[in-house]
Amino acid sequence: MLVSLVIPFYNEEQCLNKVVDPLVETLETNQIDYELALVDNGSWDNTGKLIDQKVSQNPRIKKIRVEVNQGYGWGILTGLRKCQGAYLGYLCGDGQIKPDDVVKTIRHILKNDSDFVKVRRVKRMDHVVRRWVSKLYDLTVPLIFSLKVRDLNGTPKIFKRQYLDMLDLQSKDWFLDAELLIKWKRLKLEIDEIPVVFYPRLGGSSHLSLLRAIWQFAKNAYRFRTNKELVEWEKKRVSRN
């Protein structure tokens, strides 16, 4: 298996088919050797049943069930740990990135033998709350942690499988993207960015709460800024080497 993509779905019955079907069609048209790990991230609607249908129709699709939703990040981490691809990646399950741009990201990392590639949303058509939350991330996280990456939350993010254990990602919520980039900087590796357009959701509604997102960000930023977790991670990494 060449590329594994994790897509977490939390009560996304209204847009799951609209996300998965065009993506599968585009991957196969472009002859990408892929695996899709569709995560039922603790849903209580028909999301799980729809994923079951996809699995029965396509052997390249696997279902991963999280019994109790613990956050966006936990759904992704659960999926990544069960994927087989030489390249691992993830994207949101709302369909705001076009399948052609997903393929463009995959082709970039394969052609250039990059370690890590992500999208950068140069034009956004999503809800104002999400835009403000992203601006908060993009202004403060790079300042606090000396990052030069723009659009921290842009997905898909794809990297070589060899780095998964090395990164030892832990964040269960939306801070997962920031944690990945902070640790990647500590590894002193390059990040390639692909400019894309970010479209409106294909269905349903965002589960992102502005106040909750701000609280989670402040809590996680403080935790990482104190360096306790990063120090422990550095110790583990050094001991492995």
Image (cartoon, helix red, strand yellow):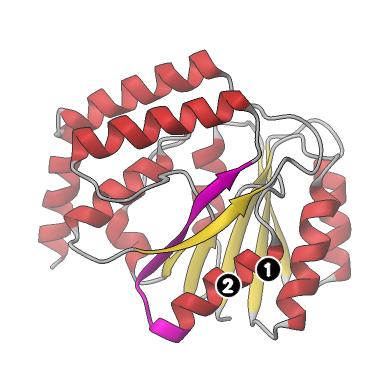
Q: Where residue 226 appears, x then y in whole percent?
A: 15, 28
Tell me if label 1 and label 2 are in contact, CB under 8 Å.
yes
SS at badge 1:
helix
**Residue at x-position 70% and y-position 86%:** 31
Alpha carbon distance from label 1 to label 2: 6 Å
- What's the residue at 51%, 58% (across, down)? 80
* 138 left or right, relative to 81: left
Q: What kind of secondary structure does the magenta stretch mostly adopt?
A: strand
At label 2, which amino acid type do we have? Lys
Side of 224 relative to 70 (left or right) = left
Instruction: Name the mark on residue 66.
Output: none
| Residue 49, position as x, y percentages in the image | 87, 47
Quadrant in which the C terminus is drawn: bottom left
Asked if residue 177 lies left or right of residue 64, the reply is: left
Identify the image quadrant of residue 130. top right
- 74 falls in the magenta region: no
Residue 35 against residue 229 in the figure, above or below: below
Q: Which residues are magenta?
A: 111-124
Residue located beneath label 1 in the image: 100
- Secondary structure beneath dot 2 equals helix
Compared with residue 235, is residue 116 higher up or lower down, i.e. above or below?
below
Q: In the rendered picture of this protein, how many numbered marks are placed on residues? A: 2
User: Is residue 86 in view from this perspective?
Assistant: no
The residue that mark 2 highlights is 104
